[in-house]
Amino acid sequence: QQWGEVLRDFTMRTQAVSAQLDTWVGEMQAARVAQTHYSWAAYLQALGNLGDEQTLWEAIQTALSDGVALDRHNFSHAIRSLAHNGRSDFAHELWQQMGALGVPSD
């Protein structure tokens, strides 16, 4: 009977630790996703500011293929930056392709 109590106590403690670990892992994953999202949005805007059409196009495709949860709002800053840098024709073309690439609306 004593071993049964020890085993029950051990099982309860193990389950509690496991639940806490699951919580921490979930929080870390959420933070990583948020950081990834923020990093990609900032990177895309920087490329737009530089007017680097080719690298911006490749970065957008990479972000989408990596499953980064970006919407058109995130891309709009980069595209607007392109337009301000005299690349409005490419910016317009890129905006039109967002739907074809599967980028959700805001």
Image (cartoon, rainbow, N blue to C red):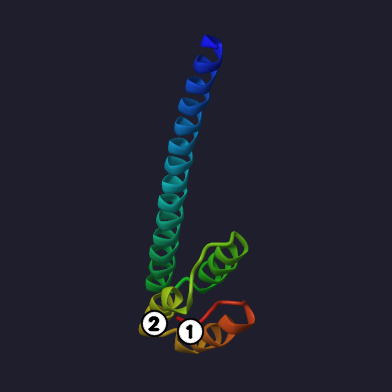
Of residues 9 and 96, the one drawn nearer to the viewer in this rendering: 9
Of residues 99 and 61, the one drawn nearer to the viewer in this rendering: 99
Return the x and y of residue 93 as percentages of the image width and height: 55, 87
User: In the image, is residue 14 above or below residue 96?
Assistant: above
Return the x and y of residue 48 as percentages of the image width and height: 42, 73
Q: Secondary structure at mark 2?
A: helix
Numbered circle sitting on residue 76: none
- Residue 106: which quarter of the image? bottom left
| Residue at the spot 51% in from the left edge and 66% down from the top edge | 69
Q: Secondary structure at mark 1?
A: helix
Circle 2 sits on which residue?
A: 80
| Residue at the spot 48% in from the left edge and 41% down from the top edge | 22
| Residue at the spot 51% in from the left edge and 74% down from the top edge | 53
User: In the image, is residue 106 above or below residue 15?
Assistant: below
Of residues 57 and 20, the one drawn nearer to the viewer in this rendering: 20
Question: Mark 2: few, some, or many residues within 10 Å (few <14, many ≥20)?
Answer: some
Return the x and y of residue 30 as percentages of the image width and height: 44, 53
Q: Quadrant of the N terminus?
A: top right
Left or right side of 79 for 61: right
The type of residue carrying mark 2 is Arg
Q: Residue furthest top?
A: 2
The type of residue carrying mark 1 is Ala
Question: Mark 1: few, some, or many residues within 10 Å (few <14, many ≥20)?
Answer: many
Left or right side of 89 for 41: left
Label pair 1/2, CB-CB below 8 angstroms: yes
Q: Residue furthest front?
A: 1
- Residue 59: which quarter of the image? bottom right
Q: Separation of disc 1 and disc 2 at Cα?
A: 7 Å
Circle 1 sits on which residue?
A: 91
